[in-house]
Image (cartoon, rainbow, N blue to C red):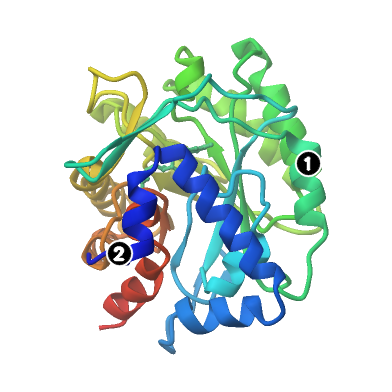
Amino acid sequence: MRRSLFQYILCGLPAEMAQTVRMTLLGAVGKIPFGKWLLKRCYAPKEEGLGREVFGIHFRNPIGIGSGFDANGDRLGELSALGFGFVEIGSVVPRPQPGTPRPRLRRLRKEHSYVDNSGYPSRGMEYVLHNVRKRTPHTANLVIGCNIGKLTASHVDNSPKEYLRVFRNMYQYVDFFVINIACNTAAKRFVPRTREEIQSLIEPLFEFRRGQLDYRPILLKISPDLTKEELDTVIDILIETPLDGIEAVAGSLDLMPEFKGAATGALLTKRAIEIVRYIAERTEHNYPIIGSGGAMTPDDIASMMEAGASLVALNSGIRENGFKLLRKGAERVKK
Ligand SMILES: Cc1cc2nc3c(=O)[nH]c(=O)nc-3n(C[C@H](O)[C@H](O)[C@H](O)COP(=O)(O)O)c2cc1C
């Protein structure tokens, strides 16, 4: 995709700084009079007829923001004005964690990819709650997903309790949940892969949801490094439990073993689409899939949807090509 001059400049900065600059400017534009109107005019998809129902929620279009892009929910109003179909905040963890020391995000220029070793820095659940509670007219209709992740410092045995704590507290303020069982690079040991490990995380959430008046869909976000057997186990869990869908996939630890961290972006495109297709075919297209991983161009977004994704979550694609990927992607999907 052709980059704007601004995007060229951003890509010349260290990767994490580029994102800070992007989000700071986005916030600044959002604050000026008519700023959000301007964002909408410049970037929001013009296409009609992109809306769809997925797991009982209406999405105005299928292209959203993936986790780790606006992790603390600081720019919900602006991302809504830009026209994204949803924003997945997080990974949210029960208390603030700084993540790994910088530099922790490497851009692989030639590969149009990144290696993320950030360890899910987060300002913690209370901070994020504050952001999602104060829904404004700009975010009133925005679909917000909450990705819950592993607190790096705490013991694996505490994870079910900690995931439940975030789930309960966020329950009434977001629209759906994504339970991250892919790897937090700073907590390498934590990749629940067996049925028992995965169920120990999600069963308490189902139990809590049973007692609520409002229904919140729960999805599992998986690693692209699972073996076929492990992927089949996840699909069996999807079919046999009240799980609502799968987000496939997170960054890969196996793709770039020479670097410490999870590879994202174009290096991941093929694998992500293959996994989405495999899940869709094995479940006979009966369960929603959020496609994530390597959606860098409008064609990638379309391929992800053709493979069986109901929604597509962007992250590296915007880091590389800017927010115009949304409008171009929507035009391509509408064709
Ligand atoms: C800098 C960065 C931070 C991320 N943080 C999170 C996170 O906190 N939780 C999570 O589930 N995924 C996180 N991800 C993974 C993305 O949500 C996404 O699954 C992955 O990057 C693959 O998509 P992409 O190729 O479009 O980037 C992060 C990715 C990047 C690049």
Q: Is residue 4 left or right of residue 49?
A: left
Q: Nearer the viewer, mark 1 or mark 2?
A: 1
Q: Judge: label 1 CB < 8 Å from ligand 1.
A: no
Please give the name of the residue rendered at 76% of the width and 59% of the height, measured from the top-left corner.
Answer: 214
User: Sequence-wise, which precedes: disc 1 or disc 2?
Assistant: 1
Give coordinates of residue 285: x percent, y percent: 33, 60
Please give the name of the residue rendered at 30% of the width and 60% of the height, measured from the top-left corner.
Answer: 308
Instruction: Identify which amino acid the numbered label 1 is placed on.
Output: Tyr
Q: Judge: label 2 CB < 8 Å from ligand 1.
A: no
Does residue 76 lie above or below 293 as drawn? Answer: below
Q: Is residue 124 left or right of residue 78?
A: right
Residue 190 visible to the viewer: no
Does residue 51 lie above or below 80 as drawn? Answer: below
Q: Is label 1 in a helix, a strand or a loop?
A: helix
Q: Which residue is mark 1?
A: 127
Give coordinates of residue 283: x percent, y percent: 33, 51
Q: Quadrant of residue 62?
A: bottom left
Please give the name of the residue rendered at 62% of the width and 82% of the height, measured from the top-left corner.
Answer: 37
Give coordinates of residue 261: x percent, y percent: 37, 23
The quadrant the C terminus occupies is bottom left
Instruction: Identify which amino acid the numbered label 2 is placed on.
Output: Met
**Splitting the image into four quadrants, where does ligand 1 fall?**
top left
Q: Is residue 169 left or right of residue 289?
A: right
The answer to which of 325 and 196 lies nearer the viewer is 325
Does residue 101 lie above or below 269 as drawn? Answer: above
The quadrant the N terminus occupies is bottom left
Q: Which residue is mark 2?
A: 305
